Image (cartoon, helix red, strand yellow):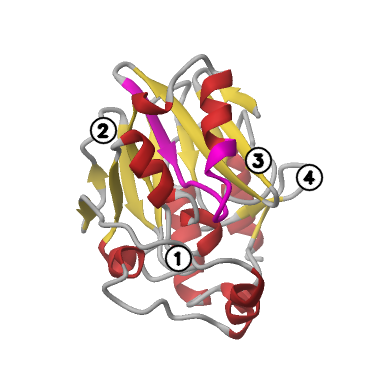
Amino acid sequence: MREVVDGVIEIPIAYVHAYAVVVDDGVVLVDTGLPGRADKVVRAIEEARRRIGEVHTILLTHWHPDHVGGVAELRRRSGARIVAHAGDASRISGAKLRHRSRFLRVVGAVMPAPEPVPVDETLTADGPISVPGFTAFHTPGHTSGHASFLLDRAGGVLFAGDAVRSGRTGRIRRGPKMITEDREAESASISRLADLTFDAAVFGHGRAISHDAAQRFREFVVQGV
């Protein structure tokens, strides 16, 4: 694990990242990684000199298994509230079957299905959420209910989830077309994020950008990639 900015801890879980954010009254998780890897998240929290019982909220960017795989187990251990956008909430809770592309069906053959979990706070509009300092933005494209979160800290920290990803040099790029529900909506969401003010950005996949991240987004939009 590593600290991207003060109190924002990147937790690598195979090919995906979850994040622990230390706040005044405990810890907030953003996504939870792959199924069966909850122990890794717990160890990262302990290495940050915190306890799993201090996790009071889990923010989910979207319903894909590599992002919600540990949420049920971490909820049991912590008692945390779950926050997700309305567009994906029914798939996270199990009320609606998870639509899976051909690629995700292949993944499902080798990866356990995430355990459904109730969503305690369903987001329907952009704006502040129940956790002070966090603002949610609906960024559909990768999934219909994908959400990104902006933390008011260190000039702004954007949790982009899979709205975009970054390469080894921190250059912004799109995710694979085969697992993106709506490419046109994805483009619009990236443009909206580029209009926000933030200095750092972290991603479900790819290297975190610690400084001048918003400028990287704007360059990507101008290039029209």
According to the picture, the residue beneath numbered tag 1 turns out to be: 188
Check disc 1: other Cα within 10 Å, few if <14, some if 14-19, many if 20+.
some
Q: Compare marks 3 and 4 and give the one earlier in the sequence.
A: 3
According to the picture, the residue beneath numbered tag 3 turns out to be: 12
Q: Does the stretch in magenta take in 39?
A: yes
According to the picture, the residue beneath numbered tag 2 turns out to be: 131
Percent position (x, y) of residue 89? 29, 63
- The alpha-carbon separation of the residues under discs 4 and 1 comes to 24 Å
Q: Compare marks 4 and 1 and give the one earlier in the sequence.
A: 4
Percent position (x, y) of residue 121? 21, 50
- The alpha-carbon separation of the residues under discs 3 and 4 comes to 15 Å
Q: Does the stretch in magenta take in 99?
A: no
Q: Is disc 4 placed on a helix, strand or loop? A: loop
According to the picture, the residue beneath numbered tag 4 turns out to be: 168
Amino acid of disc 4: Arg
**Residue 214 visible in the picture:** no
In front: mark 3 or mark 4?
A: 3
